[in-house]
Amino acid sequence: RRRKWRELMTEAKKTTAQKAADAKRSIQQRVFAARMNMEKLARTAKGQVGSHKYSYVTHENVIDCCLVPLMEEGVLIAQEVRVHDGEQMMRTALVNCDDPTDFMFSEAYIPRIQDPQKIGSWMTYLKKYTLKGLLGLPDTDDDDGASASGTNAGNTVEKKKADYGEGVHAVTPTEVKLVKEGPGGQWKLFAIDSVDGEFTTFEPFVANACNRASKNKESINIKFEEKKGRVNAMSVVD
């Protein structure tokens, strides 16, 4: 009995020590541990522009992928609207539950839209992409380019991208088209002069371009310019 008691006490001390060590982990350590247990993102939503059909990741897909692993590591997802210099921004934060002052976040501007339905769709859209950016969750694989262009799965086109700020990516210099998708009027990037099809990346300056463009337009042409491996300019093509 004494031996059993000593074994139980030793195990209890180890468990207590482990819990104490876990509680001291930083938000980056927790997110890293959670990321290791996240499965590949599902793409359950379907869309079509002209003859081009595609599938894409929804906000619910992202939550399904990351919520449980993050909770198991003591990480809270907090998403809220903030105001900066008179502009509304969607902020997504990953918070250390054992130390709420320890967190990481990503922000994106919310376009000025009067239609409540459209602004709601935009907010959902930004929640998805800021959260994906924080977690480094890709929603494409090697077969995406082939499936979008109608070629065989083995004949894919490499999608070269350049870093643009924290947690986001931009396409390489090319002319692309912003196309409204669905009844919510969300915007999606599509390549014009490339066979690798759909670009699902989102940039804050794209939202500003949409604001400046005519509200009656269903598509906007955008040109990205690159310098030293980074996208440094964007212009609306008439």
Image (cartoon, rainbow, N blue to C red):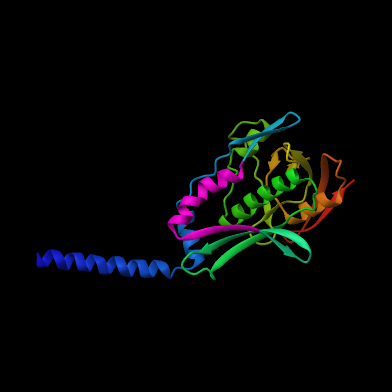
Q: Specify whether residue 188 is in view.
A: no
Determine the residue located farthest toward the front in the rendered image: 116
Q: Position of residue 46 (x, y in %)?
A: 64, 34
- Which quarter of the figure is the N terminus placed in? bottom left
- Residue drawn 73% across and 37% down? 183
Instruction: Specify whether residue 97 is in view.
Output: yes
- The quarter of the picture where residue 162 lies is bottom right
> x, y percentage for residue 117?
73, 43
| Residue 168 image-quadrant placement | bottom right
* Residue drawn at the location 34% of the way across and 67% of the way down: 18
The reply to whether the magenta stretch includes residue 7 is no
150 shown above or below 5: above
Name the side, left or right, on which 216 lies relative to 207.
right
| Magenta residues, start to end | 57-80
Q: Is residue 73 magenta?
A: yes
The x and y percentages for residue 177 are: 79, 43
Q: Nearer the viewer, residue 190 or 179?
A: 179
Tell which residue pokes out farthest to the right in this image: 238
